[in-house]
Amino acid sequence: MEDSETDVVRKGPLTDIRLIELGQLIAGPFCGQLMADMGADVIKVEPPGQGDPMREWGRGDYPLWWSVCARNKRCVTANLRLPEGQELVRKLIRQADMVLENFRPGTLERWGLSYEELSKDNPGLIMIRVSGYGQTGPNSKRAGYAAIGEAMGGMRYLCGEPDRQPSRTGLSMGDSLAATFACNGALAALHHRDKTGEGQVIDASIFESVLNVMEATIPEYTVSKYIRERSGATLPNVAPSNIYDCKDGSFLIAANQDTVFQRLCAAMGQPELADDERFKTHTARGQRMQELDGLISEWTMTKTIAEVDQLMQDAGVPAGGIYRAPEMLEDPHFEARDAIIDMPTDEWPNLKMQNVFPKMSKTQGEVRWPGVRTLGVHNQSVYSELLDLSDEELADLQKKSII
């Protein structure tokens, strides 16, 4: 994609916002992606010569994660370890609403880019800081990846089968949660700035982001000394809500509410189960989860997934398939919702990816372009537009490895 193609008009609720993204990998850049999806002018700063390691991440034959996490962003290079590079970024930040980073706490301060310094020239600046442990506390200077934050925040202990070591979710949930909370905080800070003109710092740690989705685990322990344990594919005392085998695969049925369970029993041709004292109430079903799951499995194994699915639809029972990418691409509901979009590139004419979310009735954002592979592709447009640098000055900066 040529640089000129990024001149597409931005759409969304944040088209008047500029964010300078200094982070790398997932926790910071996913926050930047959320902002860019909503129309913000996100300028991603990468180290010259190497770029964000995310450029090489992904699975399959080619690293394609970059096409998602760097979409809608203008990508420039600047060497933040050199004074000249630091000064370039400082000048960009003077013209920005937000700056985003996910380095180890103290790194920006060593580079002379602390909030105290940056806000002198830009008092309305919002600095978004994403880290493993937060900017304060005894662990703040420790290296922290999502896996550590997920473990410390309590998620890892609850993932997996009860007779095995804790597992992980298969996705970088800690990073994504931290990025989402960081974005939420930044948008709240924008509202505050609109009222007062004041900027501020958003301190989003991975471990606290995980902690904040841990439901009632803390109060349950403080009141009852109850510690939740791993329960595999089910939630303790919530039944029926499980994956059941059919003739041609697995299918998920969630009918744990009393009235929904009654509809499930009718669909199974066994309405008497709803009045059976063993399963009549939520508490009773939870206590006999395995017994109930066995009865449902006996029924589902006599039918195909399509047959069970239709019966559940007709009965108004929540149910659905266990989707992978192929099933998502074939599902008409995904198509009707534009949940997945075509975003072809020169290299990948059939490239598809998830769409901007959530949907907004008045100011919907959009994917304007996927992450661009060429390192520093927007150096000329950004530095000439915002800093008024000439081609000769840019060439000199590149020669000195500043950009």
Image: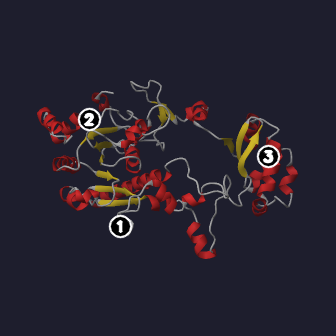
Residue 373, given in percent of the width and then of the height, sits at 35, 33
323 left or right of 195 in image: right
79 left or right of 360 in image: left
Residue 297, given in percent of the width and then of the height, sits at 79, 46
Q: Nearer the viewer, residue 262 or 136?
A: 136
Residue drawn 38% across the image and 46% down it: 35
Tags 1 and 3 touching, CB below 8 Å: no
Please tell me whether mark 1 or mark 2 is closer to you in this view: 1
Q: How many marks?
A: 3
Circle 3 SS class: helix
Badge 2: residue crowd in 10 Å (few <14, some 14–19, many ≥20):
many
Task: Find residue 297 and name its label.
Answer: 3
Image color mode: secondary structure
Quarter of the image where one finds residue 182 = bottom left
Residue drawn 62% across the image and 54% down it: 160
**Which amino acid does the dot numbered 1 rest on?**
Thr
Residue 66, given in percent of the width and then of the height, sits at 40, 38
345 left or right of 222 in image: left
Quarter of the image where one finds residue 166 = bottom right
Is 133 above or below relative to 270? below
Badge 1: residue crowd in 10 Å (few <14, some 14–19, many ≥20):
few
Measure the alpha-carbon separation of dots 1 and 2: 35 Å
Measure the alpha-carbon separation of dots 1 and 3: 51 Å
Measure the alpha-carbon separation of dots 3 and 2: 57 Å
For marks 3 and 2 on the same chain, the one whose residue lies earlier in the sequence:
3
Task: Find residue 38 and name its label.
Answer: none
Residue 250, given in percent of the width and then of the height, sits at 71, 40
**Which amino acid does the dot numbered 2 rest on?**
His
Residue drawn 74% across the image and 45% down it: 244
Q: Which residue lies under the disc numbered 2?
A: 378
Q: Which residue lies under the disc numbered 1?
A: 136
**Which amino acid does the dot numbered 3 rest on?**
Ser
